[in-house]
Image (tube, helix red, strand yellow):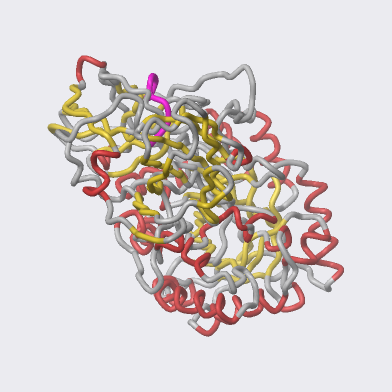
Amino acid sequence: MHTFEIRDRFLLDGEPFTILSGAIHYFRVHPSDWHHSLYNLKAMGFNTVETYMPWNLHEPEPGVFDFEGIADVARFLDEAAELGLWIIVRPTPFSCGEWEFGGLPAWLLTDRTMRPRSRDPKFLACVARYYDALMPILTERQITRGGNIIMMQVENEYGSYCEDKEYLRAIRDLMLERGVDVPLCTSDGPWRGCLRAGTLIDDDVFVTGNFGSRSKENFAALKAFHEEHGKNWPLMCMEFWDGWFNRWGENVIRRDAQDLADCVRELLELGGSINLYMFHGGTNFGFMNGCSARHTHDLHQVTSYDYDAPLNEEGNPTEKWYKLRDVVRDLFPDAWTAEPLIKQAVACSEDALTMTGRTGLFENLDNLSEPVRSLYPQAMEDMGQSYGYTLYRTRIERDVAPDAEERIRVIDGRDRAKVYVEGKLVATQYQEHIGEDIRCVLPERENRLDILMENMGRVNYGHKLLADTQHKGIRTGVCVDLHFVQNWEAYTLPLDDISAIDYSAGWAEGTPSFTRFEFTLDEPADTFIDTTGFGKGVAFVNGTNVGRYWEIGPIATLYVPHGLTRAGVNELVLFETEGHVRDAISLRAEPLIHTLETEGVE
Protein backbone atom coordinates (compact mmCIF):
# COMPACT_ATOMS: atom_id res chain seq x y z
CA MET A 1 0.00 0.00 0.00
CA HIS A 2 1.29 3.48 -0.89
CA THR A 3 1.48 6.49 1.43
CA PHE A 4 1.14 10.22 0.83
CA GLU A 5 2.09 12.90 3.37
CA ILE A 6 2.40 16.67 3.53
CA ARG A 7 5.40 17.83 5.59
CA ASP A 8 7.93 20.40 4.42
CA ARG A 9 7.46 18.74 1.04
CA PHE A 10 5.11 16.20 -0.45
CA LEU A 11 6.18 12.63 0.32
CA LEU A 12 4.99 9.64 -1.70
CA ASP A 13 6.02 6.39 -0.04
CA GLY A 14 8.36 8.48 2.08
CA GLU A 15 10.17 9.99 -0.92
CA PRO A 16 10.00 13.63 -2.16
CA PHE A 17 7.24 13.99 -4.74
CA THR A 18 6.36 16.83 -7.11
CA ILE A 19 2.68 16.88 -8.04
CA LEU A 20 2.35 17.37 -11.79
CA SER A 21 -1.41 17.47 -12.20
CA GLY A 22 -3.89 18.44 -14.86
CA ALA A 23 -7.62 19.13 -14.54
CA ILE A 24 -9.99 16.94 -16.53
CA HIS A 25 -13.69 17.30 -15.70
CA TYR A 26 -15.32 13.95 -16.39
CA PHE A 27 -18.68 15.72 -16.71
CA ARG A 28 -17.40 17.80 -19.64
CA VAL A 29 -15.94 14.84 -21.56
CA HIS A 30 -17.98 11.97 -22.97
CA PRO A 31 -17.14 8.70 -21.16
CA SER A 32 -15.98 7.18 -24.45
CA ASP A 33 -13.16 9.77 -24.39
CA TRP A 34 -12.04 9.52 -20.76
CA HIS A 35 -9.21 7.12 -21.56
CA HIS A 36 -8.09 9.32 -24.47
CA SER A 37 -7.78 12.41 -22.24
CA LEU A 38 -6.23 10.60 -19.27
CA TYR A 39 -3.69 8.83 -21.46
CA ASN A 40 -2.66 12.14 -23.02
CA LEU A 41 -2.14 13.59 -19.53
CA LYS A 42 0.09 10.67 -18.63
CA ALA A 43 1.93 10.84 -21.97
CA MET A 44 2.81 14.50 -21.35
CA GLY A 45 4.74 13.34 -18.30
CA PHE A 46 2.24 14.33 -15.63
CA ASN A 47 1.45 12.03 -12.71
CA THR A 48 -1.87 13.27 -11.29
CA VAL A 49 -5.37 14.19 -12.46
CA GLU A 50 -7.69 16.61 -10.68
CA THR A 51 -11.45 17.05 -11.00
CA TYR A 52 -14.38 18.88 -9.50
CA MET A 53 -17.57 16.94 -8.72
CA PRO A 54 -20.61 19.12 -9.41
CA TRP A 55 -23.38 18.59 -6.89
CA ASN A 56 -26.09 19.60 -9.37
CA LEU A 57 -25.03 16.79 -11.71
CA HIS A 58 -25.13 14.11 -9.04
CA GLU A 59 -28.29 15.21 -7.17
CA PRO A 60 -30.52 16.74 -9.85
CA GLU A 61 -33.55 16.52 -7.55
CA PRO A 62 -33.58 16.42 -3.74
CA GLY A 63 -32.69 12.90 -2.68
CA VAL A 64 -32.39 11.62 -6.28
CA PHE A 65 -28.81 10.70 -7.14
CA ASP A 66 -27.13 10.05 -10.48
CA PHE A 67 -23.79 8.27 -10.84
CA GLU A 68 -24.34 6.77 -14.28
CA GLY A 69 -23.09 7.63 -17.77
CA ILE A 70 -21.22 10.93 -17.81
CA ALA A 71 -21.86 11.14 -14.03
CA ASP A 72 -20.12 7.78 -13.35
CA VAL A 73 -17.29 9.31 -11.36
CA ALA A 74 -16.24 5.89 -10.02
CA ARG A 75 -15.49 4.67 -13.53
CA PHE A 76 -13.53 7.84 -14.32
CA LEU A 77 -11.41 7.51 -11.18
CA ASP A 78 -10.80 3.84 -11.91
CA GLU A 79 -9.68 4.60 -15.46
CA ALA A 80 -7.20 7.11 -14.05
CA ALA A 81 -5.94 4.53 -11.57
CA GLU A 82 -5.47 1.94 -14.32
CA LEU A 83 -3.16 4.39 -16.10
CA GLY A 84 -1.13 4.89 -12.92
CA LEU A 85 -2.34 8.44 -12.27
CA TRP A 86 -2.75 9.81 -8.76
CA ILE A 87 -5.95 11.74 -8.12
CA ILE A 88 -6.94 15.01 -6.42
CA VAL A 89 -10.70 15.34 -6.01
CA ARG A 90 -12.63 18.50 -5.17
CA PRO A 91 -16.05 17.28 -3.95
CA THR A 92 -16.91 20.69 -2.54
CA PRO A 93 -20.56 21.80 -2.40
CA PHE A 94 -19.56 24.77 -4.57
CA SER A 95 -17.18 24.36 -7.49
CA CYS A 96 -17.27 27.57 -9.59
CA GLY A 97 -15.58 26.17 -12.72
CA GLU A 98 -17.76 28.21 -15.12
CA TRP A 99 -20.44 25.61 -14.42
CA GLU A 100 -24.14 26.37 -13.92
CA PHE A 101 -24.63 27.90 -10.43
CA GLY A 102 -21.08 26.86 -9.59
CA GLY A 103 -22.28 23.28 -9.17
CA LEU A 104 -24.94 24.10 -6.59
CA PRO A 105 -28.33 22.47 -7.33
CA ALA A 106 -30.96 24.96 -8.46
CA TRP A 107 -33.53 23.29 -6.20
CA LEU A 108 -31.78 24.93 -3.24
CA LEU A 109 -33.40 28.18 -4.42
CA THR A 110 -36.91 26.95 -3.68
CA ASP A 111 -36.36 27.57 0.04
CA ARG A 112 -35.94 31.33 0.25
CA THR A 113 -35.21 31.10 3.97
CA MET A 114 -32.07 28.99 3.34
CA ARG A 115 -28.67 30.57 2.80
CA PRO A 116 -26.56 28.24 0.62
CA ARG A 117 -22.80 28.10 1.11
CA SER A 118 -23.08 29.08 4.76
CA ARG A 119 -23.38 27.53 8.22
CA ASP A 120 -27.19 27.49 7.82
CA PRO A 121 -28.27 24.11 9.30
CA LYS A 122 -30.74 23.55 6.47
CA PHE A 123 -28.02 23.92 3.89
CA LEU A 124 -25.60 21.70 5.80
CA ALA A 125 -28.31 19.02 6.07
CA CYS A 126 -28.58 19.04 2.26
CA VAL A 127 -24.81 18.71 1.93
CA ALA A 128 -24.81 15.85 4.43
CA ARG A 129 -27.39 13.94 2.39
CA TYR A 130 -25.32 14.46 -0.77
CA TYR A 131 -22.13 13.34 0.96
CA ASP A 132 -23.89 10.23 2.24
CA ALA A 133 -24.22 9.21 -1.42
CA LEU A 134 -20.93 10.56 -2.78
CA MET A 135 -18.34 9.84 -0.12
CA PRO A 136 -18.55 6.01 -0.19
CA ILE A 137 -17.42 6.21 -3.83
CA LEU A 138 -14.40 8.31 -2.85
CA THR A 139 -13.31 6.91 0.49
CA GLU A 140 -12.72 3.39 -0.81
CA ARG A 141 -10.42 4.88 -3.48
CA GLN A 142 -8.21 6.80 -1.05
CA ILE A 143 -4.49 6.02 -0.99
CA THR A 144 -4.93 5.05 2.64
CA ARG A 145 -7.11 2.14 1.48
CA GLY A 146 -5.08 1.03 -1.50
CA GLY A 147 -6.52 3.53 -3.97
CA ASN A 148 -5.10 6.53 -5.80
CA ILE A 149 -6.82 9.57 -4.25
CA ILE A 150 -4.08 11.52 -2.48
CA MET A 151 -5.91 14.72 -1.50
CA MET A 152 -9.41 16.21 -1.24
CA GLN A 153 -10.56 19.82 -1.16
CA VAL A 154 -12.89 21.22 1.50
CA GLU A 155 -14.17 24.37 -0.27
CA ASN A 156 -13.24 26.25 -3.40
CA GLU A 157 -12.08 29.88 -3.45
CA TYR A 158 -14.17 30.61 -0.37
CA GLY A 159 -11.92 33.55 0.40
CA SER A 160 -13.36 35.25 -2.69
CA TYR A 161 -16.84 34.86 -1.26
CA CYS A 162 -17.02 34.87 2.55
CA GLU A 163 -15.07 34.24 5.76
CA ASP A 164 -17.38 31.90 7.69
CA LYS A 165 -14.92 29.56 9.42
CA GLU A 166 -17.72 27.68 11.15
CA TYR A 167 -19.10 26.76 7.73
CA LEU A 168 -15.69 25.60 6.50
CA ARG A 169 -15.22 23.47 9.59
CA ALA A 170 -18.71 22.01 9.17
CA ILE A 171 -17.90 20.90 5.59
CA ARG A 172 -14.59 19.45 6.76
CA ASP A 173 -16.32 17.56 9.55
CA LEU A 174 -18.94 16.16 7.17
CA MET A 175 -16.09 14.73 5.13
CA LEU A 176 -14.18 13.34 8.10
CA GLU A 177 -17.31 11.76 9.58
CA ARG A 178 -17.81 9.84 6.33
CA GLY A 179 -14.36 8.33 6.29
CA VAL A 180 -12.13 10.83 4.51
CA ASP A 181 -8.60 10.39 5.88
CA VAL A 182 -6.32 11.70 3.10
CA PRO A 183 -4.94 15.25 3.49
CA LEU A 184 -7.51 18.02 3.05
CA CYS A 185 -6.85 21.32 1.32
CA THR A 186 -8.37 24.63 0.27
CA SER A 187 -7.54 26.77 -2.77
CA ASP A 188 -7.82 30.55 -2.97
CA GLY A 189 -6.25 33.58 -4.52
CA PRO A 190 -2.72 33.89 -3.12
CA TRP A 191 -3.06 37.31 -1.48
CA ARG A 192 -3.44 37.57 2.29
CA GLY A 193 -7.01 38.86 2.45
CA CYS A 194 -8.27 35.99 0.35
CA LEU A 195 -6.21 33.38 2.22
CA ARG A 196 -7.22 34.72 5.61
CA ALA A 197 -10.92 34.50 4.75
CA GLY A 198 -11.00 31.20 2.88
CA THR A 199 -8.62 28.83 4.64
CA LEU A 200 -8.51 26.61 7.72
CA ILE A 201 -4.77 26.91 8.17
CA ASP A 202 -4.98 26.92 11.95
CA ASP A 203 -6.85 23.62 11.70
CA ASP A 204 -4.00 22.11 9.65
CA VAL A 205 -5.95 22.06 6.39
CA PHE A 206 -3.35 22.46 3.63
CA VAL A 207 -3.42 25.83 1.83
CA THR A 208 -2.87 26.18 -1.95
CA GLY A 209 -3.10 29.17 -4.28
CA ASN A 210 -4.69 29.82 -7.68
CA PHE A 211 -2.93 31.90 -10.34
CA GLY A 212 -1.60 31.67 -13.89
CA SER A 213 1.63 33.66 -13.93
CA ARG A 214 4.16 35.49 -11.71
CA SER A 215 4.87 32.32 -9.76
CA LYS A 216 7.76 33.80 -7.78
CA GLU A 217 5.61 36.65 -6.51
CA ASN A 218 2.56 34.49 -5.81
CA PHE A 219 4.53 31.72 -4.11
CA ALA A 220 6.22 34.36 -1.93
CA ALA A 221 2.81 35.57 -0.76
CA LEU A 222 1.62 32.01 -0.17
CA LYS A 223 4.80 31.12 1.76
CA ALA A 224 4.49 34.27 3.89
CA PHE A 225 0.96 33.26 4.86
CA HIS A 226 2.14 29.74 5.74
CA GLU A 227 4.94 31.11 7.89
CA GLU A 228 2.65 33.64 9.59
CA HIS A 229 0.74 30.63 10.92
CA GLY A 230 3.81 28.58 11.78
CA LYS A 231 3.66 26.25 8.78
CA ASN A 232 6.54 25.00 6.67
CA TRP A 233 4.44 23.48 3.91
CA PRO A 234 5.31 22.83 0.26
CA LEU A 235 4.05 25.33 -2.29
CA MET A 236 1.35 24.34 -4.76
CA CYS A 237 -0.76 26.13 -7.34
CA MET A 238 -4.07 24.28 -7.41
CA GLU A 239 -5.28 26.17 -10.49
CA PHE A 240 -2.55 27.31 -12.84
CA TRP A 241 -4.63 28.99 -15.53
CA ASP A 242 -3.21 27.94 -18.91
CA GLY A 243 -6.00 29.59 -20.92
CA TRP A 244 -9.39 31.11 -20.23
CA PHE A 245 -13.10 30.62 -20.86
CA ASN A 246 -15.23 32.47 -23.41
CA ARG A 247 -18.53 34.35 -23.41
CA TRP A 248 -21.15 35.15 -26.01
CA GLY A 249 -20.38 38.15 -28.18
CA GLU A 250 -16.71 38.35 -27.18
CA ASN A 251 -13.63 37.27 -29.10
CA VAL A 252 -12.01 33.96 -28.16
CA ILE A 253 -9.23 34.40 -25.59
CA ARG A 254 -5.85 32.85 -26.42
CA ARG A 255 -2.60 32.49 -24.48
CA ASP A 256 0.74 32.14 -26.21
CA ALA A 257 2.03 28.57 -25.91
CA GLN A 258 5.64 29.55 -25.26
CA ASP A 259 4.58 32.03 -22.57
CA LEU A 260 2.69 29.25 -20.81
CA ALA A 261 5.63 26.85 -21.04
CA ASP A 262 7.99 29.49 -19.66
CA CYS A 263 5.66 30.28 -16.75
CA VAL A 264 5.21 26.59 -15.89
CA ARG A 265 8.97 26.12 -16.01
CA GLU A 266 9.42 29.05 -13.62
CA LEU A 267 6.97 27.54 -11.13
CA LEU A 268 8.58 24.10 -11.23
CA GLU A 269 12.10 25.51 -10.92
CA LEU A 270 10.93 27.23 -7.73
CA GLY A 271 10.23 23.77 -6.35
CA GLY A 272 6.46 24.10 -6.56
CA SER A 273 3.78 21.60 -7.49
CA ILE A 274 1.14 22.38 -10.10
CA ASN A 275 -2.34 21.56 -11.28
CA LEU A 276 -2.99 22.89 -14.77
CA TYR A 277 -6.46 24.39 -15.07
CA MET A 278 -7.53 23.11 -17.53
CA PHE A 279 -5.62 20.23 -19.08
CA HIS A 280 -8.70 19.25 -21.10
CA GLY A 281 -11.58 21.70 -20.83
CA GLY A 282 -14.21 19.86 -22.86
CA THR A 283 -17.80 20.98 -23.37
CA ASN A 284 -20.67 22.48 -21.38
CA PHE A 285 -23.20 20.00 -22.72
CA GLY A 286 -26.90 20.74 -22.32
CA PHE A 287 -27.74 23.83 -20.28
CA MET A 288 -24.75 23.63 -17.91
CA ASN A 289 -22.71 26.68 -18.91
CA GLY A 290 -22.10 29.21 -16.17
CA CYS A 291 -22.30 32.99 -16.10
CA SER A 292 -19.95 35.81 -15.11
CA ALA A 293 -21.59 38.21 -12.67
CA ARG A 294 -21.51 41.89 -13.53
CA HIS A 295 -23.15 44.95 -11.97
CA THR A 296 -26.02 45.15 -14.47
CA HIS A 297 -25.47 42.83 -17.43
CA ASP A 298 -24.24 39.36 -16.48
CA LEU A 299 -22.15 37.66 -19.17
CA HIS A 300 -23.15 34.11 -20.03
CA GLN A 301 -20.51 31.64 -21.12
CA VAL A 302 -20.50 29.68 -24.37
CA THR A 303 -21.02 25.95 -24.82
CA SER A 304 -17.41 25.20 -25.67
CA TYR A 305 -15.07 24.94 -22.68
CA ASP A 306 -12.03 24.55 -24.93
CA TYR A 307 -10.22 26.96 -22.55
CA ASP A 308 -7.27 27.15 -24.97
CA ALA A 309 -5.94 24.21 -22.95
CA PRO A 310 -3.14 21.72 -23.78
CA LEU A 311 -5.87 19.46 -25.18
CA ASN A 312 -8.47 21.15 -27.38
CA GLU A 313 -12.21 20.68 -26.95
CA GLU A 314 -12.08 17.45 -28.91
CA GLY A 315 -9.28 16.13 -26.69
CA ASN A 316 -6.41 16.37 -29.18
CA PRO A 317 -3.01 17.91 -28.31
CA THR A 318 -2.33 21.56 -29.07
CA GLU A 319 1.01 23.35 -29.36
CA LYS A 320 0.86 23.86 -25.60
CA TRP A 321 0.86 20.09 -25.02
CA TYR A 322 4.11 19.59 -26.91
CA LYS A 323 5.85 22.56 -25.26
CA LEU A 324 4.81 21.38 -21.80
CA ARG A 325 6.07 17.89 -22.55
CA ASP A 326 9.41 19.47 -23.44
CA VAL A 327 9.46 21.19 -20.05
CA VAL A 328 8.76 17.91 -18.26
CA ARG A 329 11.42 16.06 -20.22
CA ASP A 330 13.94 18.75 -19.35
CA LEU A 331 13.18 19.12 -15.63
CA PHE A 332 12.06 15.54 -14.90
CA PRO A 333 14.10 13.33 -17.25
CA ASP A 334 12.97 10.16 -15.46
CA ALA A 335 9.28 10.88 -16.08
CA TRP A 336 7.55 8.59 -18.56
CA THR A 337 6.41 10.40 -21.69
CA ALA A 338 5.01 9.20 -25.02
CA GLU A 339 3.33 10.34 -28.20
CA PRO A 340 -0.27 11.51 -27.73
CA LEU A 341 -3.46 9.87 -28.92
CA ILE A 342 -5.10 11.84 -31.75
CA LYS A 343 -8.65 11.46 -33.06
CA GLN A 344 -9.98 12.42 -36.47
CA ALA A 345 -13.27 14.27 -36.84
CA VAL A 346 -15.49 13.92 -39.90
CA ALA A 347 -17.14 16.53 -42.10
CA CYS A 348 -20.43 16.20 -44.00
CA SER A 349 -21.52 18.69 -46.63
CA GLU A 350 -25.04 20.06 -46.78
CA ASP A 351 -25.81 17.50 -49.47
CA ALA A 352 -25.09 14.71 -46.97
CA LEU A 353 -27.73 15.88 -44.48
CA THR A 354 -31.43 15.61 -45.22
CA MET A 355 -34.05 17.77 -43.54
CA THR A 356 -36.82 15.40 -42.45
CA GLY A 357 -39.16 17.74 -40.62
CA ARG A 358 -39.91 21.09 -39.02
CA THR A 359 -42.56 21.91 -36.48
CA GLY A 360 -43.41 24.67 -34.03
CA LEU A 361 -42.98 24.85 -30.27
CA PHE A 362 -46.48 26.29 -29.82
CA GLU A 363 -47.91 23.38 -31.78
CA ASN A 364 -46.09 20.88 -29.54
CA LEU A 365 -46.49 22.29 -26.06
CA ASP A 366 -48.80 19.53 -24.89
CA ASN A 367 -46.38 16.92 -26.26
CA LEU A 368 -43.52 18.35 -24.22
CA SER A 369 -45.07 19.49 -20.96
CA GLU A 370 -48.08 19.46 -18.66
CA PRO A 371 -49.29 23.00 -17.96
CA VAL A 372 -48.86 24.38 -14.45
CA ARG A 373 -51.79 26.66 -13.63
CA SER A 374 -51.46 29.57 -11.19
CA LEU A 375 -52.97 32.97 -10.53
CA TYR A 376 -49.64 34.70 -11.16
CA PRO A 377 -46.54 33.46 -13.00
CA GLN A 378 -44.16 31.43 -10.86
CA ALA A 379 -40.39 31.29 -11.01
CA MET A 380 -38.90 28.30 -12.78
CA GLU A 381 -37.54 26.69 -9.59
CA ASP A 382 -40.89 26.99 -7.79
CA MET A 383 -42.39 24.76 -10.48
CA GLY A 384 -39.71 22.09 -9.98
CA GLN A 385 -37.67 23.10 -13.03
CA SER A 386 -33.94 23.87 -12.96
CA TYR A 387 -32.80 24.46 -16.56
CA GLY A 388 -33.99 25.31 -20.04
CA TYR A 389 -37.04 27.35 -21.05
CA THR A 390 -40.47 28.13 -19.63
CA LEU A 391 -43.45 29.19 -21.77
CA TYR A 392 -45.94 31.37 -19.87
CA ARG A 393 -49.41 31.75 -21.40
CA THR A 394 -52.51 33.76 -20.59
CA ARG A 395 -55.27 35.72 -22.35
CA ILE A 396 -55.59 39.51 -22.27
CA GLU A 397 -58.45 41.78 -23.30
CA ARG A 398 -58.06 44.78 -25.55
CA ASP A 399 -59.10 47.87 -23.58
CA VAL A 400 -58.02 50.45 -26.18
CA ALA A 401 -59.15 51.34 -29.68
CA PRO A 402 -58.49 48.57 -32.28
CA ASP A 403 -55.63 50.54 -33.87
CA ALA A 404 -54.16 51.92 -30.63
CA GLU A 405 -51.08 50.49 -28.94
CA GLU A 406 -51.30 48.69 -25.61
CA ARG A 407 -48.45 48.61 -23.10
CA ILE A 408 -47.12 45.25 -21.82
CA ARG A 409 -44.34 44.83 -19.24
CA VAL A 410 -42.63 41.69 -17.93
CA ILE A 411 -41.90 42.51 -14.31
CA ASP A 412 -38.82 40.95 -12.75
CA GLY A 413 -37.76 38.15 -15.09
CA ARG A 414 -34.58 36.34 -16.07
CA ASP A 415 -32.72 35.84 -18.35
CA ARG A 416 -34.24 36.45 -21.77
CA ALA A 417 -37.85 36.95 -22.83
CA LYS A 418 -39.53 36.52 -26.20
CA VAL A 419 -43.05 37.98 -26.13
CA TYR A 420 -45.78 36.91 -28.59
CA VAL A 421 -49.31 38.18 -29.09
CA GLU A 422 -51.58 35.84 -31.02
CA GLY A 423 -48.47 33.93 -32.13
CA LYS A 424 -46.67 37.02 -33.49
CA LEU A 425 -43.38 38.20 -31.96
CA VAL A 426 -43.72 41.68 -30.47
CA ALA A 427 -40.51 41.94 -28.42
CA THR A 428 -37.27 40.25 -27.38
CA GLN A 429 -35.83 41.48 -24.10
CA TYR A 430 -32.62 40.44 -22.38
CA GLN A 431 -31.60 41.00 -18.75
CA GLU A 432 -31.66 44.73 -17.93
CA HIS A 433 -34.19 45.48 -20.68
CA ILE A 434 -36.79 43.17 -19.18
CA GLY A 435 -39.40 45.43 -17.58
CA GLU A 436 -39.28 48.12 -20.25
CA ASP A 437 -42.47 48.98 -22.10
CA ILE A 438 -43.54 46.74 -24.97
CA ARG A 439 -45.89 48.74 -27.20
CA CYS A 440 -48.03 46.76 -29.61
CA VAL A 441 -51.47 46.68 -31.22
CA LEU A 442 -53.69 43.88 -29.91
CA PRO A 443 -55.34 42.39 -33.02
CA GLU A 444 -58.30 40.74 -31.29
CA ARG A 445 -60.81 41.60 -28.61
CA GLU A 446 -59.27 38.78 -26.54
CA ASN A 447 -55.66 37.86 -27.27
CA ARG A 448 -53.34 34.99 -26.43
CA LEU A 449 -50.16 36.22 -24.76
CA ASP A 450 -47.13 33.89 -24.79
CA ILE A 451 -43.82 34.66 -23.11
CA LEU A 452 -40.92 32.28 -23.68
CA MET A 453 -38.34 32.73 -20.94
CA GLU A 454 -34.84 31.27 -21.22
CA ASN A 455 -32.53 30.48 -18.31
CA MET A 456 -29.18 31.19 -19.97
CA GLY A 457 -27.13 29.94 -17.00
CA ARG A 458 -26.74 30.98 -13.37
CA VAL A 459 -23.68 32.81 -12.07
CA ASN A 460 -20.86 30.57 -10.92
CA TYR A 461 -18.68 33.03 -8.99
CA GLY A 462 -18.95 36.15 -6.88
CA HIS A 463 -21.42 38.20 -4.91
CA LYS A 464 -24.48 37.47 -7.07
CA LEU A 465 -24.55 33.79 -6.17
CA LEU A 466 -27.51 34.34 -3.83
CA ALA A 467 -29.06 37.26 -5.70
CA ASP A 468 -32.71 37.03 -6.70
CA THR A 469 -31.55 37.06 -10.33
CA GLN A 470 -30.59 33.40 -9.92
CA HIS A 471 -34.29 32.55 -9.72
CA LYS A 472 -35.20 32.17 -13.40
CA GLY A 473 -38.38 32.72 -15.36
CA ILE A 474 -40.96 35.36 -14.40
CA ARG A 475 -40.67 36.06 -10.69
CA THR A 476 -43.25 38.80 -10.09
CA GLY A 477 -45.73 39.07 -12.93
CA VAL A 478 -46.78 40.72 -16.18
CA CYS A 479 -48.55 44.05 -16.46
CA VAL A 480 -50.88 45.16 -19.23
CA ASP A 481 -51.46 48.89 -19.00
CA LEU A 482 -50.94 49.41 -15.23
CA HIS A 483 -52.34 46.20 -13.79
CA PHE A 484 -50.99 42.70 -13.23
CA VAL A 485 -52.57 39.99 -15.37
CA GLN A 486 -53.87 36.83 -13.71
CA ASN A 487 -54.71 33.23 -14.65
CA TRP A 488 -51.57 31.75 -16.18
CA GLU A 489 -50.53 28.45 -17.66
CA ALA A 490 -46.82 27.65 -17.58
CA TYR A 491 -45.16 24.95 -19.67
CA THR A 492 -41.82 23.88 -18.21
CA LEU A 493 -39.40 23.01 -21.02
CA PRO A 494 -36.18 21.43 -19.73
CA LEU A 495 -36.13 19.57 -23.07
CA ASP A 496 -34.54 16.51 -21.51
CA ASP A 497 -36.76 14.34 -23.73
CA ILE A 498 -37.81 15.51 -27.20
CA SER A 499 -38.98 12.13 -28.49
CA ALA A 500 -42.68 13.11 -28.36
CA ILE A 501 -42.38 15.99 -30.83
CA ASP A 502 -44.93 15.72 -33.66
CA TYR A 503 -43.29 16.98 -36.86
CA SER A 504 -46.63 16.93 -38.66
CA ALA A 505 -48.18 19.48 -36.28
CA GLY A 506 -47.26 22.53 -38.36
CA TRP A 507 -45.19 25.66 -37.84
CA ALA A 508 -45.76 29.38 -38.22
CA GLU A 509 -42.84 31.31 -39.70
CA GLY A 510 -40.98 33.46 -37.17
CA THR A 511 -41.98 31.36 -34.14
CA PRO A 512 -39.82 28.92 -32.13
CA SER A 513 -39.35 25.66 -33.96
CA PHE A 514 -37.71 22.25 -34.09
CA THR A 515 -35.90 21.33 -37.32
CA ARG A 516 -34.85 17.71 -37.79
CA PHE A 517 -32.06 16.43 -40.03
CA GLU A 518 -30.62 13.00 -40.70
CA PHE A 519 -27.04 12.07 -41.61
CA THR A 520 -25.30 8.75 -42.12
CA LEU A 521 -21.90 7.69 -40.78
CA ASP A 522 -19.89 4.59 -41.58
CA GLU A 523 -18.81 4.46 -37.93
CA PRO A 524 -19.14 6.67 -34.85
CA ALA A 525 -17.02 9.81 -35.22
CA ASP A 526 -16.40 13.24 -33.76
CA THR A 527 -17.84 16.16 -35.70
CA PHE A 528 -18.84 19.82 -35.34
CA ILE A 529 -22.33 21.15 -36.18
CA ASP A 530 -22.12 24.35 -38.23
CA THR A 531 -25.04 26.46 -36.98
CA THR A 532 -24.50 29.28 -39.49
CA GLY A 533 -27.86 30.67 -40.60
CA PHE A 534 -29.68 29.71 -37.42
CA GLY A 535 -30.25 32.30 -34.71
CA LYS A 536 -30.27 30.99 -31.15
CA GLY A 537 -31.16 27.74 -29.46
CA VAL A 538 -29.87 24.28 -28.63
CA ALA A 539 -29.02 21.20 -30.67
CA PHE A 540 -29.73 17.52 -30.05
CA VAL A 541 -27.83 14.58 -31.52
CA ASN A 542 -29.66 11.27 -31.23
CA GLY A 543 -31.73 12.79 -28.44
CA THR A 544 -28.87 14.26 -26.38
CA ASN A 545 -28.63 18.01 -25.85
CA VAL A 546 -25.10 18.94 -26.97
CA GLY A 547 -25.45 22.61 -25.98
CA ARG A 548 -26.45 26.12 -26.93
CA TYR A 549 -25.67 28.04 -30.10
CA TRP A 550 -26.09 31.78 -30.77
CA GLU A 551 -25.42 33.69 -33.94
CA ILE A 552 -23.58 36.48 -32.08
CA GLY A 553 -20.58 34.11 -31.77
CA PRO A 554 -17.70 33.95 -31.42
CA ILE A 555 -18.00 30.17 -31.91
CA ALA A 556 -20.35 29.06 -34.70
CA THR A 557 -20.12 25.31 -34.20
CA LEU A 558 -21.11 22.74 -31.59
CA TYR A 559 -18.80 19.83 -30.83
CA VAL A 560 -20.30 16.33 -31.05
CA PRO A 561 -18.20 13.52 -29.50
CA HIS A 562 -18.10 10.18 -31.28
CA GLY A 563 -19.77 8.58 -28.26
CA LEU A 564 -23.02 10.35 -29.16
CA THR A 565 -23.03 9.19 -32.77
CA ARG A 566 -23.52 5.73 -34.29
CA ALA A 567 -22.84 3.80 -37.45
CA GLY A 568 -25.76 4.29 -39.80
CA VAL A 569 -28.46 6.96 -39.61
CA ASN A 570 -28.12 9.71 -37.01
CA GLU A 571 -30.66 12.36 -36.01
CA LEU A 572 -29.85 16.05 -35.52
CA VAL A 573 -32.52 18.40 -34.14
CA LEU A 574 -32.15 22.16 -33.68
CA PHE A 575 -34.51 23.99 -31.35
CA GLU A 576 -34.50 27.54 -32.70
CA THR A 577 -36.02 30.42 -30.72
CA GLU A 578 -35.43 33.34 -33.09
CA GLY A 579 -37.24 32.01 -36.14
CA HIS A 580 -34.02 31.94 -38.18
CA VAL A 581 -34.04 28.58 -39.92
CA ARG A 582 -32.48 26.88 -42.89
CA ASP A 583 -33.42 23.75 -44.82
CA ALA A 584 -29.76 22.73 -45.05
CA ILE A 585 -26.94 22.31 -42.55
CA SER A 586 -23.39 20.93 -42.62
CA LEU A 587 -20.96 19.19 -40.27
CA ARG A 588 -17.34 20.28 -40.02
CA ALA A 589 -14.13 18.51 -39.05
CA GLU A 590 -12.98 21.48 -36.95
CA PRO A 591 -14.60 24.34 -35.04
CA LEU A 592 -15.61 27.56 -36.78
CA ILE A 593 -14.56 30.65 -34.85
CA HIS A 594 -15.30 34.22 -35.87
CA THR A 595 -13.32 37.34 -35.02
CA LEU A 596 -15.82 39.96 -33.87
CA GLU A 597 -15.51 43.67 -34.51
CA THR A 598 -17.08 44.57 -31.19
CA GLU A 599 -17.12 42.72 -27.92
CA GLY A 600 -19.90 42.10 -25.45
CA VAL A 601 -23.55 41.17 -25.74
CA GLU A 602 -25.83 44.11 -26.49
In this view of the protein, which residue sits in the foreground, 437 or 447?
447
Q: In which quarter of the image is residue 532?
A: top left
Task: Please state which of residues 331 and 378 is positioned toward the viewer in this rendering.
Answer: 378
User: In the visual, does 502 lie left or right of 416?
Assistant: left
- The magenta stretch spans which residues? 531-537
Q: Count of labels shown?
A: 0
Can see residue 268?
yes
| Residue 200 to residue 100: above or below | below
Vertical relation: 549 (above or below) 194: above
Residue, x 65% and y 35% (percent of image)? Answer: 260
Place residue 208 in its image quadrant. Answer: bottom right
Residue at 70 percent of width and 79 percent of height = 166
Point out residue 160 in the picture as x, y percentages from the top left corner: 72, 58
Determine the residue located farthest toward the bottom in the rendered image: 177
Q: Is residue 57 magenta?
A: no
Quadrant of the rendered structure where residue 521 is?
top left
> Which quadrant: the N terminus?
bottom left
Left or right: where 92 falls relative to 397: right
Residue 209, x across and y down, in percent: 71, 56
Would residue 536 be counted in the magenta stretch? yes
> Height in image: 101 above or below 286?
below
Mainly helix, strand or loop, the magenta region?
Answer: loop
Residue at the image position 51 percent from the left and 74 percent from the top: 127
Give the residue at x 41% y 35%: 420
Position of residue 67 in the picture relative to residue 178 (left or right): left
**Can residue 48 be spotted in the picture?**
no
Q: Quadrant location of the C terminus?
A: top right
Residue 312: percent from left, percent from top: 47, 34
Relative image position of residue 471 (x, y in whole percent): 54, 56
